């Protein structure tokens, strides 16, 4: 059953014209720049029309000429653009905006070249995108200030990881805060730029239907899953210092939890939304060593098959450490101590080399209190609302309906809203939307310093416990749904992860 056909029209247009800008991309030859940022800038330039004189300066350590850098972009960024979006003219127009500047981020003297390349008009919007390791954030900001490049019209974008614990996150906030004010700092979490996350806001606060039910009286539990089929790939160096808890849970999963759990903000202005998210983070029940053992599961993938293809264990990946204790999977039962959510468990999990590539939020409602039909009350599947972030973006509302024919037999049916099908509009990638917000100066979808610290504060006891503990992550087979302990974690509450409760097809 689909309700897509009932929903048409795209509403008013909110596109605001962009003012002229100079955007400087630190880490301009890195993996993120090539895979995500340059393709996103290309798409925005093509579809949103950057101001005629807007410039993009790509900064890197290599001593490349402009031509050599553009060849890199051609070889490594272009393949990440969908072919239908590519045309020789728009590619050339984009490349004409790009200037390569060779610079050593730690060496203040080399910023002279950047200052000379950039336009000197102080009224111009300047965006400094730091797609570099966080250890360089403070140095870069300091050097920008030294070189007179940190003007009041400047913005700085910080890529994750934003620290590796509370202490380092505080340090980053303090150091960057010496140069830029909070309203100039854009801490990116690309999950907040995903279409379905924005649609969750629309669903909750653009309809009256769910809000009265969105509380402990009617909701039994919430599951948030981000499962990936990919392994660690060529990012072993980074991943060994991170693990799933720092890489996914501290940021993406907690941000999704905030959007599900926050109180209605008074508007969608940055501080209105961020104040509400902060309250959620501060209401998360802190773990103690005793509650941790019960409520947190960590795993590490062993060899197996993903989509029928044999894959090695995490420890045997390129540059892998045969003794590594880094977790590639984590599942947590979180609790929010507020009137709205007391007693409603939020189960969060994420892992690499899982059975499927998906990200979804499942809001499960309470069971029917009583059956007036011949069927026992236990045969009624509780209603659930599934918000799919990927691979397909949409909503599924699970209801009980009568099966056709004689008698009164009820069975679960799925009311489905497929966003692609409904809004036949080209999608904006998360990075496109977020870059556009940076250029427009809109901070709503970016984390504030206190939010970042509150998220670290909550995960810190887990990190400390794991560091002190002798035990290792539980092994799980690649291509599975993670360690059995994750099923046990939710099973203790008489529940199952969604994929375990779905009928076989
Ligand atoms: C990144 C993590 O932030 O998110 C990666 O560092 C992860 O490890 C990625 O693969 C997942 O993002 P997406 O948008 O592909 O689900």
Image (tube, grey):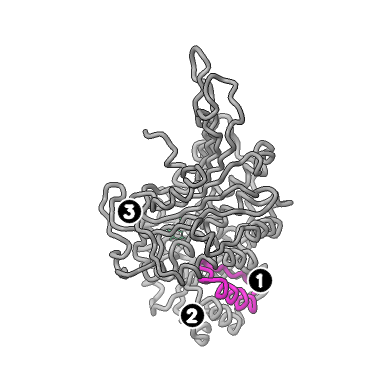
Mark 2 crowd level (few <14, some 14–19, many ≥20, 10 Å Cα): many
Distance between the alpha carbons at the discs numbered 3 and 2: 39 Å
Residue hosting label 1: 153
Tell me which image quadrant ligand 1 sits in: bottom left
Q: CA distance from mark 2 to mark 1?
A: 21 Å
Number of the label disc, if any, that sits on residue 478: 3
Mark 1: C-beta under 8 Å from nearest atom of ligand 1? no
Circles 1 and 3, Cβ within 8 Å, touching? The answer is: no
- Of circles 3 and 2, the one toward us is 3
Residue with the most extreme front position: 290
Q: Tag 1's secondary structure?
A: loop
Residue 105: mark in rendering = 2
Query: Measured from the top left, where is residue 405 in percent x and y?
Result: 48, 13
In the current view of this chain or complex, which residue is farthest to the top?
406
Which segment did they paint magenta? Answer: 153-181
Under tag 2, what secondary structure? loop
Q: Is residue 29 visible?
A: no
Q: What is the x, y in percent for residue 120?
A: 61, 77
Residue 208: quarter of image: top right
Dot 3 lies on which element?
Answer: strand
Q: Is residue 404 above or below residue 310?
A: above
Mark sitting earlier along the chain (1/3): 1
Asked if 387 appears above or below 111 in the picture, the reply is above
Q: Is residue 215 visible?
A: yes
Front-most of residues 289 and 360: 289
**Circle 1 residues within 10 Å: few <14, some 14–19, many ≥20:** some
**Is residue 167 located in the magenta-colored stretch of the structure?**
yes
Q: Residues within 10 Å of mark 3 (few under 14, many from 20)?
A: many
């Amino acid at each position: 059953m689909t309700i897509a056909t009932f929903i048409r029209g795209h509403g008013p247009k909110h596109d605001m014209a962009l003012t002229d800008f100079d955007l400087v991309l630190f880490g301009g030859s890195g993996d993120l720049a090539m895979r995500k940022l340059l393709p996103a800038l290309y798409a925005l330039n093509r579809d949103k029309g950057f101001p005629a004189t807007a410039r993009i300066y790509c900064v890197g350590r290599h001593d490349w000429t402009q031509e050599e850098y553009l060849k890199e972009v051609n070889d490594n960024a272009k393949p990440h653009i969908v072919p239908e979006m590519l045309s020789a003219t728009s590619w050339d127009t984009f490349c004409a905006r790009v200037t390569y500047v060779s610079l050593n981020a730690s060496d203040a003297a080399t910023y002279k070249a950047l200052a000379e390349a950039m336009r000197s008009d102080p009224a111009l919007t300047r965006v400094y995108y730091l797609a570099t390791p966080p250890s360089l954030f403070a140095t870069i900001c300091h050097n920008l200030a030294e070189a007179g490049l940190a003007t009041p019209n400047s913005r700085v974008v910080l890529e994750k990881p934003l620290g590796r614990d509370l202490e380092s996150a505080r340090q980053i906030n303090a150091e960057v805060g010496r140069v830029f004010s909070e309203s100039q700092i854009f801490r990116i979490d690309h999950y907040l730029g995903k279409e379905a996350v924005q649609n969750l806001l629309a669903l909750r606060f653009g309809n009256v239907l769910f809000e009265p039910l969105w509380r402990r009286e009617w909701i039994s539990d919430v599951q948030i899953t981000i499962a990936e089929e990919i392994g660690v790939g060529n990012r072993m160096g980074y991943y060994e210092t991170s693990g799933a808890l720092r890489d996914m849970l501290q940021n993406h999963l907690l941000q999704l939890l905030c959007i599900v759990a926050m109180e209605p903000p008074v508007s969608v202005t940055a501080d209105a939304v961020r104040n509400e998210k902060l309250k959620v983070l501060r209401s998360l029940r802190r773990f103690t060593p005793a509650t941790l053992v019960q409520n947190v599961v960590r795993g590490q993938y062993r060899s197996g098959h993903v989509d029928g293809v044999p894959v090695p264990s995490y420890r045997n990946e390129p540059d892998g450490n045969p003794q590594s204790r880094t977790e590639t999977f984590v599942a947590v039962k979180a609790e929010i101590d507020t009137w709205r959510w007391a007693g409603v468990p939020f189960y969060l999990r994420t892992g690499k080399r899982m059975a499927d590539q998906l990200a979804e939020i499942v809001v499960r409602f309470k069971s029917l209190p009583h059956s007036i039909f011949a069927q026992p009350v236990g045969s009624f599947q509780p209603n659930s609302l599934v918000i799919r972030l990927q691979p397909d973006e949409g909503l599924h509302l699970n209801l009980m309906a009568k099966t056709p024919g004689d008698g009164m037999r009820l069975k679960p049916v799925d009311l489905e809203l497929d966003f692609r099908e409904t809004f036949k509009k080209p999608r904006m990638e998360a990075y496109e939307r977020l870059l556009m917000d940076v250029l427009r100066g809109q901070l709503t979808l970016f984390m504030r310093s206190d939010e970042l610290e509150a998220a670290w504060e909550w995960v810190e006891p887990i990190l400390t416990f794991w560091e002190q503990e002798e035990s290792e992550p539980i092994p799980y087979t690649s291509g599975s749904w993670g360690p059995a302990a994750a099923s046990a974690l939710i099973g203790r509450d008489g529940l199952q992860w969604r994929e375990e409760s779905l009928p076989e097809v």
